[in-house]
Amino acid sequence: MIPSPDHLLVLPVAIPLLTGALLLIFARWPLVVRRAISGVAAVLLALIAIQLLMMSGDDAVRVYLLGDWAAPFGILLVLDRLSALMLVLTALLALFALAYAVQEADSDGHNFHALFQFQLLGLNGAFLTGDLFNLFVFFEILLLASYGLLLHGGGAERTRAGLHYVVLNLIGSSFFLIAAGLLYSVTGTLNMADLAVQMRALPAEDLPIAAAGGLLLLAVFGLKAALLPLHFWLPHAYGAAAAPVAALFAIMTKVGAYAIVRVFTLVFGVEAGPLAGLADPWLLPVALASIALGTIGVLASDDLRRMTAYLVIASVGTLLAGIGLMTEAGLSGALYYLVHTTLVTGGLFLLADLVANGRRVGARITPRERPAGAGVLSVLFLLGAMAMIGMPPLSGLIGKLLILLAALPEPAVQWVWTVILISSAMLLIGLSRAGITLFWRGPPSPQAAPSALRLLPAAALIGSSPLLVIFGGPLTDLAAATAGQVLNPDRYVEAVLGAATVRETVGGAP
Amino acid sequence: MIIELLVAFFLVVGASFALIGSWGLLRLPDFFTRLHGPTKATTLGIGGTLIASTIYFSAQTGGPSLHELLVTLFLFITAPVSAHLLAKAALHQRIRSIAPPPEIDEPRE
Amino acid sequence: MEALVAFAIGLLVACGVYLMLRARTFPVIIGLVLFSYATNLFLFAAGRLKTDEPPLIYATQSYTDPLPQALVLTAIVIGFAMTAFVVVLALRARGELGSDRVDGGEREEER
Amino acid sequence: MILQTAVYIAFVMISLATLLNLWRLVRGPDQPDRILALDTLFINTIALLVLLGIHFGSAVYFESALVLAMMGFIGTAAFCKYLLRGDIIE
Amino acid sequence: MSRWLPHPLLSVTLLVVWLLLVNTVSVAQVLFGLLLAVVIPRFTSAFWPERPRVRQPLRLIRYLLLVIGDIVIANFHVAHLILFRSHRLRPAFIELPLELTDEFAITVLASTVSLTPGTVSADVSADRRTLLIHCLDAPDPDALCAEIKSRYEAPLKEILG
Amino acid sequence: MALGWIILLPLIGAVVSPLLARAGRDAPAWAAGAATALALLPALWHAPAIFAGGEVLTSVPWIPQLGLDFALRLDGLSLLFVLLILIIGLLVILYARYYLPKSDPLGRFFALLLLFQMAMLGIVLSDNLILLLVFWELTSLTSFLLVGYKHGSPEARRGARMALVITGSGGLALLAGFLLLGGMVGSYSLSVVLASGELVRNHPLYLPTLVLILLGAFTKSAQFPFHFWLPHAMSAPTPVSAYLHSATMVKAGVFLLARFFPVFSGTEVWFFLVGGVGLATLLFGAYTALFKHDLKGLLAYSTISHLGLITLLFGLGTPLGAVAGLFHIINHATFKASLFMAAGIIDHEAGTRDMRRLNGLWKYMPHTATLAMVAAAAMAGVPLLNGFLSKEMFFAETIHVQWLTQSQWLLPAMATLAGVFSVAYSVRFIHDVFFNGEPIDLPRTPHEPPRWMKIPVELLVAVCLLVGILPGQTVRPLLDAAVRGTLGEVPAFSLAIWHGFNLPLLMSLVALSGGILIYTLRHRLFALHDRLFPSVTGEVLFRRGTRAAPWYSRGVMDRFDNGSLQRYTAWLIGSVVVLIGAALWGGIELDGGLWTPIDGVSVVAAVILVIAAVGTVVVRHQRMLALVMTSVVGLVVTLTFIHFSAPDLALTQISVEVVTTILLLLALFFLPGGERPEVSMPRRLRDGTLAGLAGLGIALLAYAMMTRPGAPISDYFLAQAEPLGGGTNVVNVILVDFRGYDTLGEITVLAIAATGIFALLQGLRLPLPQGDLSGRRWARDAHPLIMAAISRPLLPLALVVAIFILMRGHNEPGGGFIAGLIAGTALILQHLASGIQWTQERLRFRYFPIIGLGVLLATVTGLGALLLGYPFLTSAVLHLDLPLIGELHLASAMAFDLGVFLVVVGTVMLILENLGRLSRQPHIHPPEEGS
Ligand code: NA
Ligand code: NA
């Protein structure tokens, strides 16, 4: 039988790539046309992503051999539960961010839609790839697109933040290359599944080199994930970015988290021999420190955008705390929390923009003016804040509970619990102060209230939180199944290294 | 053998010119005199080595291998322009010159 | 030879890092350029050092590892794109912030 | 044998030449001096490539030499333009 | 003719360059070279609108041979100066009044001057009437001036107008 | 599932009532009332079974991962609370309908009230710890919204936030406690937990679990020292106070004590913690209540005190204590709710709650006064009222319990003391408001409230009386059921007014007479109190805390994140150094055996590299010079690539380097630098150390790496490049075929860079330097003749070279990248030599379409394979045997490479040209140097 490659796997990459290229070629077409093209692509991506997620539900690991080269020689796309989940999350977030952007923000600068598509390309590519160096390439794509998007619209604050963000990430990218070199030099391969296999049989004298490579990767991914002390770029960048961009960026830190999960479960996973658990001593402390710092940042913020940015740091910490446990329960909780925090922080960024547009003092947390449409906005803020704090009955609670529970049998339990719970209490203080100051104090603003159409994306993203709770059963099952699959990399390795090319089967080249 | 000798000859001659040009760059007293060394001596130096290469590869492959001529040609076209631009820049900057520099049509500071 | 190359890479890293830690954009960019030279050499060195064994299938019997070369080529081009971006961004910062400082002092200069 | 010796001698001479260029480049004293030194360094490097080609009996160095010649010129031109006008593309 | 081959000489040069590049002469390469020789000048003709009109190609070749010879001599001369007289040089700037008007011709002259004995062209005056030349060792600037004019400028004027 | 409706109906009501707000003020009230009344039905439906000793359980799985089921449990205890919540809820709804101002459409209010009701019902009905917690925190949240209902007032906001933070944080502690408890027992099912008391009490984690759960209970029930939020919550509308802060929400804490009584009680820790806190709260609340001039403030502290009483009762750990506690829960709910409502009526009608101004209201509202007096008497524990009965039981229990081994009398004495104060403030409530002369300066003349506003109070007072007189006939079955639900069995206890002359009765009498005495001495006590207790309370600490938290946080952030990229970079490099250090910590065998001989040329190159690299650092302030040095480094790197068999890399490196140089020169025009270094020695030392360590680490790794023999996958590429990839330049075949996907990504990077850079340059205005750093003005001649004249013929030559490099890339060093760079630089040379305008006039294409087309071409080439049934980017080779020309290989990879070429040309041109255009923006003249 001829194995027909499932071309659906390549579409999450091909669609934004083609769309981006078209948008460049026709950069002078009317904005409305470009919006339509971008929107159609985003919807298509979402549909495909959902289809892929459903496909991944059979627990199979699907492989797409690009260029029809067998692993480990060519580059391949791998669709497992984790990558499918990330694809769906990205697509959904993008859809709402775009829905918000097309109402105004995309006209503030040049080529917004092309950059947006390229951003999606980078994200999807990073989630799908099974090759370490290719991961680097798609990191660069998503970073460069994010630089462009971050700076979209201009302004001093954005420029300063952008400069810091770009320089730090350039350094990070260089370390990625060094890490790739180190790993390649001892394993002779770049395919992550093959790396996993090679890692198991690595001679003792090569271990320090591989360890250095792995730890460098940890630093690189930690930078993307904004883990302490590599987080500095985030509050400034996210606080300054245009709202839909910041909303889309909610997934960016998760790319770092994703990469940590992927590499440190597959390449340095339980079966990696002496290097198994390479990241373990580092992840948890750093994650907890990030929670603490994010929380302090939330308390210190005097701007709703900045506050949301620090919420991202705190939530990344929580996420990584779950991942850092390196157990199925921890990972499962972290994955659920990942979905929650991505959607909700995305919504909060949009909300912050609605607030800023609704008053003459912007998103500053000052009682000088209540935003127009404070009623709806305050409800959204309340929901978002509750979700981020981890108050019931919203998704943050479920996520944090799963992580706390997962920590219970671990030696570090008191640390995890103390930090997460105290952080929650502090967030409660900070967010209640912000909410009261913004929505309960001060005279109403004369600005126009946001239209329903503008509210919709924010409402949908924040409103996902109760849905995540109502469908918490199936979702946590999905997260658990995903965690289970990720923590048993054998199937991944078999699927990748066993994938047959069309060439072999048909015989001869096309 | 003759070919080998030829190659060796052109190589050594070329390298000598390159070295002399660089020596001039080091030893000559001011910028404008230093400019002469590299633009001429070095181009011929490269010319020599390239001729050596042409001969060598023509002999080795059995057919004419003339593509080194392209490099020579290119250098001969560009080297005078580089020198010209450098001199222009130096005149503009009014850097130290043994020969009395002419009044040039340049804005004063 | 390996020691020499390793030394060169280390030196480039050190010089690059030192420059990246400077207070103004231009030296930082130069630092990034040096650092990326080092990185490219490092990745290249992952294929080991072989003289006169270019991976061109016609002449010699043995070839150096071509894969790191392909990777470095990609890295060089990406590095160029990134450098270009950061250069332009530095200019933009100069225009928007009125200064080329990156040590936090640009805020004071704005005033 | 003669050829090999000649190649070695040439290597030594060209290497020496590059060191002399470097000396000028470091010492200056003026900007044109340094650019001139850089330009010469490029040209000597081309010679080095040709030598390598003969040394290894390999033609793969030719393109490098050609491109080096082109790029060296463009670099020097850009530097000079900078000294003259500051704005190199106007 | 001018539409299809705006620069016949350039086209020939490109064909030769192509064949030099591929370092072989085969039917396929000649055909491809011809294709390039036609296409590239068409594409780039706008960049080189003031097409130099070569009146006497044979004299051009003679001129080139002369210059190559001079270059070799120049190199020996300069090498001598560098090695043995570097401290007793009498450098000078001389201003060469130009009779040539064509930009390309002036350029060729300036290049020739730079490549030949002890001289580097340093500047062309804004009115393009004078070429400033730096001489490495010029005991007699006027004589040098005259030599350049007769040896290089005069034939160039005949060839390129 | 009928149980679910108890919770669901209020939720439905919460959704419906605001929707009805447009239909007038009655509609939402009716909806709320109906929802509450309907919710009573299922409870009453199950009541007989519960009274008969049964319990009703229902469970729907929700999030199994979490052990979270939607599991409900109706037993005696929960039935008691359900009835309290719903019945008092009904009364409050009726009351609120008349209490709230006419301007309030009521929809939002009832929605929040019903949401709260739902949450409260959820707490008492949950049979799952997590579910209980969910509802628990929901009550905190809805109470926050209800307290802050009138958020125009600062007191309301402060009170709301305080309540939220204290009870919400307590909820987090509770969460932790529950998780521990669930972990111990192995299940989050309440039924399982209740059956595992023995296990829990002997578990090593018993103490932390208990403390955490108690933190939740104590914060919610306003126990000392967490009590202070409750008085502040009095800024809520009075119906809210009556409902949340007397009858229901504050009872959630004691509910928890009751619920977990069989699990946790009976240990010394329990006794001391729960009893101690209860006692302290009892005394503190009773004492403080006396000194509150605000009616609701008095009631609030009274509530605190009574909650302390209940806590103490549970803390005693005896079955009879628990019985008394449960009984007092009922009694307190009835009299305190009615007192709040009465206070609300007074406030509503008189316009103030300040007892120093309220006097002699008896004359104006005798009916209300009577009701209030009866309720207050119940609060004071006057016989024939329900408060008396439970207080008697309390006194009796204190006597029977051993408190602090030596002193038998201490606990009864303290209980009596609390009773004294309790009587005193009750007397104050009656005398100071309804008698005590004439009202002072009231905003309006008080009169009786509307009829329907009094009905709830009347009903509640009637209950006080009924229970007080006929306890056995009225409350006994419910209490028995509740006791059974709590303890599992009903201990023998007597519920009668008269137990003969005994110690408890004596204590009651002492309390009554002592209270009256104290009240008469109140003025001297007020003065003493003001002197003795300056307001250093938990409240002040809380306020300082909530104010200090942001302040300290800001301090931390400012110190940690000073906005300096240098610091961020230093942390990044430092982290990497640490991580590399960690990897090498155990030692590394540096020499792996591979060794390549060293040669003179390499040494010379290394010397050049060292001098140039160090030189770059040294001369960094002379930026152009630094750039020259960097070029030298780039040249040596190129040489290294060539030397070690990488001609493609060398070609790329040298081309990229020149383009980069042009780029940096363009930037240098606007960033000429020239400032002096102002860096301190410690900073240089720090940076130098970091740089040195990073360099050392990476050099060690590089050496170790290079000397090891490796077994890379590349043999496959070398073997298959020609047969399968159709090319002999393996690097190029990898780039366009084996790893064409990388290359596709890479040209996309270029396209994005071009896009981003273009956007960045739009509208950018920079000061144009009029001369170089030495102050010399720029040369006049923008386009030197000779340069222009030479660069023009160079263009076609360079293009031929570029095409040559492009065409042969598959087999020889070269390819789309290098070709693109060569063509791009040749075009840029035209810009350099003749200017943008001149070049633009001749280059009649726009760059974005070129870039887009390049990406598109590469992508579409890749997609072509799909048509043949092959995956994306599969290459095809077409072998043609043409006459004259010979064999011709047409690989699809060439089309791919052409796409690469287009992108590179377009990107290089777009970037450099647009950078060049910067100087044509409207001028900004630079400020004078040094300013
Ligand atoms: Na009074
Ligand atoms: Na310009």
Image (cartoon, helix red, strand yellow):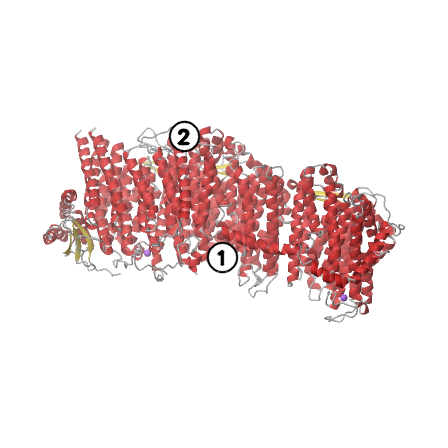
Residue F383, percent across and down?
A: 86, 56
Name the residue: 72% across, 58% down.
Answer: F240
* Mark 2 nearby-residue class (10 Å; few <14, some 14–19, many ≥20): some
- The N terminus of chain D lies in which quarter of the figure? top left
Can residue F186 be seen here? The reply is: no
| The CB of the residue at mark 1 lies under 8 Å from ligand 2 | no
Quarter of the image for residue F779 reads bottom left
Residue F718 position (above or below residue B46):
above
Identify the residue position indicated by label 2 in the image.
F710
Q: CA distance from mark 2 to mark 1?
A: 52 Å
**SS state under label 1:** helix
Q: Residues within 10 Å of mark 1 (few under 14, many from 20)?
A: some
- In the rendered image, the vertical position of residue F914 relative to residue D68, given as above or below: below
Q: Which chain does tag 2 point to?
A: F
Relative to residue F263, is residue F787 drawn left or right? left
Query: Is circle 2 on the same chain as circle 1?
Result: no
Quadrant containing ligand 2 reads bottom left
Quick one: F928 or F87, which is closer to the camera?
Answer: F928
Percent of width and height locating residue A506: 45, 32
What type is the residue that disc 2 sits on? Gly
2 vs 1, front mark: 2
Q: Which residue bears the numbered disc 1?
A: A105
* SS at circle 2: loop
Rendered location of residue F72, percent (x, y): 73, 45
Q: Residue C12 location in percent, x, y?
A: 36, 41
In which chain is the residue bearing label 1? A
Amino acid identity at mark 1: Ala
Residue A146 makes an appearance in the image: yes
Left or right, C36 with reference to F804: right
